[in-house]
Amino acid sequence: MNVMCFDLSSTCIGITFAQLRKQKPIFVRTLAVIPQLPTGKTLGYTTQEPKEIHSNGNVFKGFLKPGENRISKAEATRRLSEFKVFKHRELLKDIGKQCGRFLYKVNPSIVALERNKAFNGVLTTKLLAEIAGGIYFYAGSKNADLHDEDEATIRAKIRKDMAHVNVAEDGVVALNTKWEIYKRLQWYFETNYPGLVDFSKMTMDESDSLAVFYHLLTTHLS
């Protein structure tokens, strides 16, 4: 039985791949998917990001095309709006392409993800909701079991199950939540499944996806 677990982010998506036999993991790998951010140059502008433009005594941000020295503030605003929509769409396409490639290659019978929550930016929240929607669509089209859980519930279970684990590093107690969860997960897998999970180069996004897998494994598959 193949399983894929996701921790969604607009900058780095953590994925855990696992194969289970008789409800026990026999193969676990983590991966960080880094989306390729489109830039102004993708649309034919001279810079990757908006530059400061001086025009008729006004100073504002905007994109210039080759050969242009200045543009009106109205045109700058139009180009910024166009780029904002383009950037969101292309970022979503790239994430969908990368995650979709793994989904169709692994063909998991179970998919799990950390439930989307509100962020400071409306666009980030919207983007993650759209990414999650793509995963829901895949699960439905493939008739795969789908599980989602909020971050607080996942972390609370890990802390409860491994309350005895020393999360100190060189005698200093871990204050970073992601690092603390990472240390507990490291203890669990190295104790119960030695050699199964490589923690040596694991990113915190990968660790978060592994937390989703741990929750799935010990709650729904135990």
Image: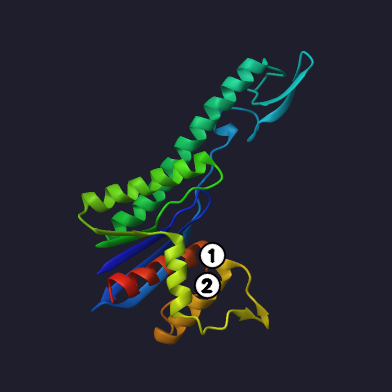
Mark 2 residue element: helix
Q: Residue furthest right?
A: 57
- Above or below, 194 against 59 in this view is below
Percent coordinates x, y for residue 158 in the rendering: 45, 74
* Quadrant placement of the N terminus: bottom left
State how far apart marks 1 and 2 are (Cα). 7 Å
Residue at 51 percent across and 54 percent down: it is: 12
Residue at 52 percent across and 83 percent down: it is: 165
- Above or below, 149 against 66 in this view is below
Mark 1 residue element: helix
- Above or below, 147 against 211 in this view is above
The circle drawn on residue 204 is: 1
The circle drawn on residue 42 is: none
Of marks 1 and 2, which one's residue comes earlier in the chain?
2
**Label pair 1/2, CB-CB below 8 angstroms:** yes
Q: Residues within 10 Å of mark 2 (few under 14, many from 20)?
A: many
Residue at 67 percent across and 17 percent down: it is: 73
Q: Is residue 202 left or right of residue 149?
A: right
Tell which of 61 and 119 is nearer to you. 119
Residue bearing mark 2:
182
Q: Is residue 161 left or right of residue 81?
A: left
Q: Amino acid at mark 2?
A: Tyr
